[in-house]
Image (tube, rainbow, N blue to C red):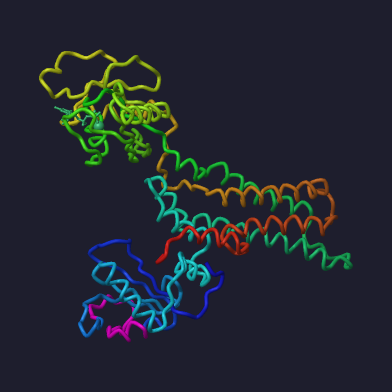
């Protein structure tokens, strides 16, 4: 990823790879409108989705075109989106034609990087876009949304302003050191300001959760002998046909995992990873023993097990009696064993309640307002706190003095704190960090 943008017009397919109903080609740069017109498309007014066509080997290819004029666009530059039939070979040919007219293939993440350079979004928002693309669960999508909305960026920006003001006042003391009547900031005032900033930072660190916690959803594993109905229950709990089910024993061989949302009594939502494994059985050959080994390893890592067969009671096991819709199953089950039917839905709500109660507070809650911090954010916030703590250690003993001593040293520590804090939103971020953030993007974004 180049760390500066040139004046070229960049181009990429922005829709998902493979065939689809519609394919999207995106161009950004000063020549974007002109280049699309050179293909024969009519593009007159911005922000209007216009049906038109492009000329292709003397044939007319129908398409929809949507143009934006910078700076009112995603990248801040002139930008055009072409919607075409979603055939990869066709999209490739159109891209080639536009390259012949002078466009350049975009690097991964270059559209968003251009937007960042144009001040359209800060670095945390760009991370939010990357996190949205890579999210594999509701909890990650929700956390990515908060980043994208700029919640962390706004918070850090306000504190950068406050810290920069405090630093400026300390530096004023250095500049006017020969004038006895100038007192830029008293030690007591500086203590108050720094303590307030540090408290806000520490509150955020204490209340936010770490991104890693979102990636490690608690595991709820369905266990039992072959054909007891594990995969059918897996599908019923998820509300979709994710696993293949069959009357033949030994249908499931691999480990299947899907995020599942559960609702607590107070309405809050919790996310877990529901897992379906092969039925527990004796292995008859090498393949069987690999399958059984994988199943048993998954059981060992379970936070909660839903057992559909006979087993001893245990703290993290929910025992269920499946297929209770069948007449043969009507004899009463043990009082600690929950009767269910994946076919009729009987007992499934109670089962979800039992999963929640077994999890206690280990579920990953989908809290609308709860920020999640990526490792880079946590590090920058902690380093800021450390530098402010160091500065406070110097200032506190002087609290009752009229003027500050050790001005140069304190200013140096505050400058360190400011560098770390400003690296969050990208106001002052070393190139290598920016490079790492945008390296996680794919081409076309
Ligand atoms: N009547 C009834 N049949 C069920 C129910 N759940 C599952 N079955 C049937 O039981 C058979 C086995 O279901 P699966 O869900 O594939 O069982 P499994 O435990 O995943 O089996 P393996 O993957 O082979 O270990 C299928 O024919 C299902 O239709 C139920 O609640 N009621
Ligand atoms: Mg199965």
Classify 202 as above or below 90. above
Q: Residue at x 29, y 76 (%)?
A: 65
Q: Nearer the viewer, residue 74 or 296?
A: 296
Q: Position of residue 371 (x, y in %)?
A: 49, 48
Q: Nearer the viewer, residue 196 or 325?
A: 325
Q: Which residues are magenta?
A: 34-53
Q: Residue at x 23, y 33 (%)?
A: 251
Q: Is residue 327 left or right of residue 243?
A: left
- The quadrant holding residue 262 is top left
Q: Position of residue 139 (x, y in %)?
A: 40, 45
Q: Residue at x 31, y 69 (%)?
A: 24
Asked if the magenta segment contains residue 38, the reply would be: yes
Classify 156 as above or below 7. above
Q: Nearer the viewer, residue 414 or 315?
A: 315
- The quadrant holding residue 424 is bottom right
Q: Is residue 208 left or right of residue 17?
A: right
Q: Is residue 205 left or right of residue 271?
A: right
Q: Residue at x 81, y 62 (%)?
A: 183
């Amino acid at each position: 990823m180049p760390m500066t943008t040139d004046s070229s017009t960049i181009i990429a397919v922005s829709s998902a790879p493979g065939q689809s109903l519609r394919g999207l080609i995106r161009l950004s740069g000063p020549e974007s409108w002109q280049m699309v017109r050179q293909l024969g498309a009519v593009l007159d007014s911005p922000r209007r989705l216009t049906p038109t066509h492009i000329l292709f080997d003397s044939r007319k290819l129908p398409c929809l075109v949507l143009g934006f004029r910078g700076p009112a666009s995603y990248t801040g530059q002139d930008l055009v989106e072409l919607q075409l039939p979603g055939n990869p070979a066709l999209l490739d040919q159109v891209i080639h034609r536009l390259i012949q007219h002078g466009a350049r293939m975009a690097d991964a993440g270059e559209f968003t990087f251009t937007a960042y350079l144009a001040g359209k979004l800060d670095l945390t928002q760009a991370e939010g876009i990357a996190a949205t693309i890579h999210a594999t669960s509701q909890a990650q999508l929700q956390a990515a949304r908060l980043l994208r909305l700029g919640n962390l960026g706004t918070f850090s920006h306000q504190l950068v302003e406050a810290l920069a003001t405090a630093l400026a006042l300390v530096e004023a003391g250095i500049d006017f050191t020969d004038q006895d009547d100038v007192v830029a900031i008293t030690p007591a005032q500086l203590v108050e300001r720094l303590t307030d900033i540090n408290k806000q930072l520490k509150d955020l660190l204490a209340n936010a959760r770490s991104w890693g916690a979102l990636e490690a959803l608690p595991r709820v594993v369905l266990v039992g002998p072959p054909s007891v109905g594990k995969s059918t229950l897996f599908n019923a709990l998820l509300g979709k046909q994710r696993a293949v089910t069959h009357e033949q024993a030994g249908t499931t061989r691999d480990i299947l995992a899907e995020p599942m949302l559960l609702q607590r009594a107070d309405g809050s939502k919790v996310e877990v990873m529901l897992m379906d494994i092969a039925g527990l059985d004796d292995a008859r050959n090498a393949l069987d023993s690999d399958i059984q080994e994988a199943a048993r390893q998954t059981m060992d890592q379970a936070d909660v097990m839903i057992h559909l067969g006979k087993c001893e009671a245990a703290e993290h096991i929910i025992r269920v009696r499946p297929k209770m819709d069948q007449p043969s199953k009507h004899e009463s089950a043990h009082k600690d064993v929950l009767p269910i039917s994946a076919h009729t839905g009987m007992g499934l709500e109670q089962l979800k309640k039992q999963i929640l109660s077994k999890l206690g507070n280990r579920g990953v809650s989908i809290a609308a307002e709860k920020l999640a911090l990526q490792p880079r954010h946590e590090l920058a916030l902690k380093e800021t706190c450390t530098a402010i703590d160091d500065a406070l250690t110097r200032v506190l003993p002087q609290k009752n003095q009229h003027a500050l001593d050790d001005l140069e040293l304190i200013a140096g520590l505050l400058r360190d704190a400011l560098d770390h804090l400003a690296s969050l939103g990208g106001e002052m971020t070393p190139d290598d960090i920016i490079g790492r953030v945008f390296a996680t993007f794919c081409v076309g974004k």
